[in-house]
Amino acid sequence: MNYETDTIAAIASGLTDSGIGIIRISGNRVLDILEKIFVPYNNNFNVNNIKSYTAHFGHIVEAESDNIIDECIIIYMKGPHSYTGEDIVEIDSHGGIFVCNKILKLVLNSGARLAEPGEYTKRAFLNGRIDLTQAEAVMDVIKADHEDALRISVDQLKGSLKNEIVRMRNIIIHENAYIEYALDDPEHVSLDGFSEKLKIIVKDLLSDIKYMLDHSEEGRIIKYGVNTVIVGKPNAGKSSLLNSLLKEERAIVTNIPGTTRDILEERALVEGIPLNIIDTAGIRDTEDVVERIGVDRAKKSIEDADLILYVIDASINLSKEDYDIIDLIKNKKVIVLLNKQDLKQVVTVEDINNLLFAPVLCISLLENMELSEIGHVIKDMFYSGELSIKDNPVITNQRQKICLENAYKSLCQVNDSIDNCMPEDFFTIDLMEAYEQLGLIIGESMQDDLVNKIFEEFCTGK
Amino acid sequence: MAYIEENYDVIVVGAGHAGCEAALASARLGMNTIMFTISMNSIAFMPCNPHIGGSSKGHLVREIDALGGEMGKNIDKTYLQSKMLNQSKGPAVHSLRAQADKEKYSIEMRKVLQNTDNLTLRQGEIVEILTDKKENTVEIKGVKTISGAVYYAKAVILCTGTYLNARCVYGDVSENTGPNGLKAADYLTDSLIAHGIKMNRFKTGTPARIDGRTVDYSKMQEQPGDETVVPFSFENSEEDIKRKQISCWLTYTNEETHKIIRNNINRSPLYNGNIESTGPRYCPSIESKVMTFADKEKHHVFIEPEGEDTNEMYVGSMSSSLPEDVQYAMYRTVPGLENVKIVRNAYAIEYDCISGTQLKSSLEFKDIKGLFSGGQFNGSSGYEEAGAQGIIAGINAARFCKGEEPFVLSRSEAYIGVLIDDLVTKETEEPYRMMTSRAEYRLLLRQDNADLRLTKKGYEIGLISEDRYNHLCEKEKMIEKEIKRLHEEKVGANKRVQNFLEAHNSTKLKTAASLAEIIRRPEFDYYSIEELDVNRPVLPKEVIEQVNIDIKYEGYIERQKRQIHQFEKMENRKIPADIDYNDVKSLRIEAMQKLSSIRPETIGMAKRIQGVSPADISVLMIYINQK
């Protein structure tokens, strides 16, 4: 069932100057193309009896001029056992945009056509290599014009999100089955006290779903990393810390308190550990409404954080605001940074040790003093297991979010039915709806609408 | 010596609950029909429990009636006691059950059959089906009896119940008979196998019948019928069928009973390997119950009358295949049965049947044109399940003869739809019993609205009279009008209303509200707000019932309707009949095999086949879409 017979090619490794550049060709003419452009080192090599999943060493050569373009390894994967389900050849070259482009041009001149964004995935889908929800995830990515993130998105569907949804569905189906079992066999199964029990279960499910909804991030690719929040009262040097970690100016740095009004989120690699860093608005009581929102969000970020970097201006006394912050973070993993070591020290390491159980570092961001020490501390915490990358399921897709909201509504209905003392068989309607809606997120249930949408975008579009 | 006897449109093999409905539907639709039975004295015979209906089965009977079938009317004529079960639960699971006078049930059904035009009854055993091979298709041609008479017909309906190669067993006694000592049908299976039909072997069982004079009812709880009797047939009113009801009796097994069973378990053919076929999990023998629910101290035992003209009583929930001496011993441990005398032994019965996956939703065989089947032969259990398939097979055999499209009910329309869909898409490994839980959309598939769901269809098919149809349309209008009135009529937040609400512990109104809104409050219903509803018209009881349910559960009904809407989209996606699954490359092998053997008619059906995953379905949909 090949829907498209032409052969497509593209640079699969992205247009960066990396060590290796991969040109991927997919379709039924890959071997013809290979024969035209590839000169193997092994004289016995013959494209007509090349075996699937074998690699071959040789040169890519421009036929007319006999010019060697690059030395490379080619890998052949015969369909249907390949990503797209079609015959695939991958050319691993020495990378570099210039070389890759040259090889690609040669491939295109030899009978392939340039692949459209997402076309490999489209073919994989049409050939049944990936399922609908995976295809959907890919579609989101294509729309975001960000092919690299494809795998993350697809993996996400298979990973923690799926596990969480499956867990919730199992709970729902178990309770539903019990009700139905009792309806069918009232002699042996009693529903006495069931409603009270179910109410608690539904309450837990609702709070789990609420959490996922609150943390859903539409249209964004999930970033894996240690969720790190920078806190401190205004002008303590939080934004400077962030900038130093990122080595570039992101937040507006001034010495007017309250400059950072919203939350900035950045990604940094510190000693090889990925951090998702959130710089919070300075936490303090404020009359300014806009800033107030920022403060509330900062408090929420703290709740969700894996690691807190607490910046203290060591040149002034600890204030009520500092004690408020300490109160907020006392149960979290914290690294305290005593900033402004260049000025006269008022707050000492001992002062902090009396208040918080956390490592304390003395820094001076203005002088960029000993920043790497922070990295070492984080690294130690990470490898000792004190810190870990949270793999929280996050919904990133609008349709999935709607399904999750529907499931939430249905479970609220179950709750209402319990409160209204409805007979147990009424619970099953909304329990099953929640089950179905959750199933739609992970492709365990399927509705016509999704299939249609995918058909439209994949099969009839373009 | 073979000779040609006669030509018919439709031949029905078997005169049990499936056969009777099939033959009546076919004859009433104008088909010249003949029905064969092994014994004219066992038409519509009830070889097991003496009641019709019960949880979800009651729904089936009302649906049969709504389509123009006979079972509901026949039980209304011959019931001894009637009960609406599960009244404490929601309206979806209310279920009607009536104790039957078995003999009268059989006689009354025979009367109806014998007074039906176009219908011939014939005693005789069918030993062969006859077919014609035409190019790629096989067509049914007729049947042959044991005496060699050949009957030709355009369509044949097999309703052989538990009679094919039947064997009755208790202890080490094994007899090759059908139920209740009736002759088994020993030859037809071979003919079916020769035609490529795959046979299964199932098992079921029945408890002893006891002498009512030897029962001490003072040690049991009386189970009387309901004061208000709801007829099974929508054509009957309570007054039409009112009678003095006869009670059933409830008693229990005890540790002594269980001890006797456990001590003799190796003498039970179910446990010593003498019976290997599969029995119904949902209708277990007492030995299975004792072994499965080991920590249960007692099990219900219902003593039910078999009829008014006999003193035999049925020992409900104690079916068994234990030897006779163990049966005596165990029954006599039950309070009230200490001195009991057995009239007929409990026994297990084994019989040949098919896997329903060889059938289309119309109950026609996929590989033999014009051959239909219904009832226990299709792997189901129960009189009601049989009757339900019977009427559909009868209707579709008639439509087949007339060259009309088959009549198929969807899972969202009727329990009958659920029953047949399950039978034809799922490999049943045990006798299939209807259960409430099998119907996804049960809030809409209630026993009280079967007429509103199906009688129009019955009319279009031709089994419902003009009168009955008009009556239904009138009922519909009355319901609609009254619901509209209750939504439109408002009560203000005045003193009279507030006092009424307060008196019923209900929140007071802030602004005016419709009567429907008041009814929907958990503490009220249509009946209890009568005082508030000054303009209430006089309406028939069955209209009020519908109005109340529709308003009271409006939100739930709406949500279920939305679910059905989604469901139907997949049901309406047809799979081409000539699809070659080998051609659908990316299907997993298991899915490919299942789909090739079951050949589902729609994507919806394909989804329900075990071993077919959502990913397989998307592959299949893409394939069909691209074609």
Image (cartoon, coloured by chain):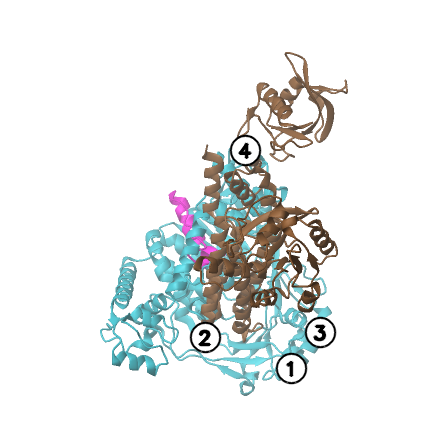
Rendering coords of residue A385 (x, y %): 72, 57
For the residues labelled 1 and 4, the Cα–Cα distance comes to 75 Å
Residues indicated by labels 3 and 1 sit on the same polypeptide chain:
yes
Residue closer to the observer: A293 or A182 = A293
Q: Which marked residue is nearer to the observer: mark 4 or mark 3?
A: 4
The residue to which callout 3 is attached is: B262
Comes first in the chain, label 1 or label 2: 2
Q: Quadrant of the N terminus of chain A?
A: top right
Q: Kindly indicate the quadrant of the structure image that contains residue B534.
A: bottom left
Rendering coords of residue B184 (x, y %): 58, 58
Quick check: can you spot residue A374?
yes
> What color is chain A drawn in?
brown
The residue to which callout 4 is attached is: A119
Q: Residue furthest front?
A: A344
Residue at 27% over, 59% down:
B470
Tell me, for residue B333, which label it has, or none: 1
For the residues labelled 1 and 2, the Cα–Cα distance comes to 32 Å
Rendering coords of residue A10 (x, y %): 59, 28
Few, some or many residues within 10 Å of mark 3 (<14, 14–19, 20+)? some
The residue to which callout 2 is attached is: B88
Q: Amino acid at mark 4?
A: Glu
Q: Is residue B287 left or right of residue A113?
A: right
Comes first in the chain, label 2 or label 3: 2
Residue B393 located within the stretch drawn in magenta: yes
Residues indicated by labels 4 and 3 sit on the same polypeptide chain:
no
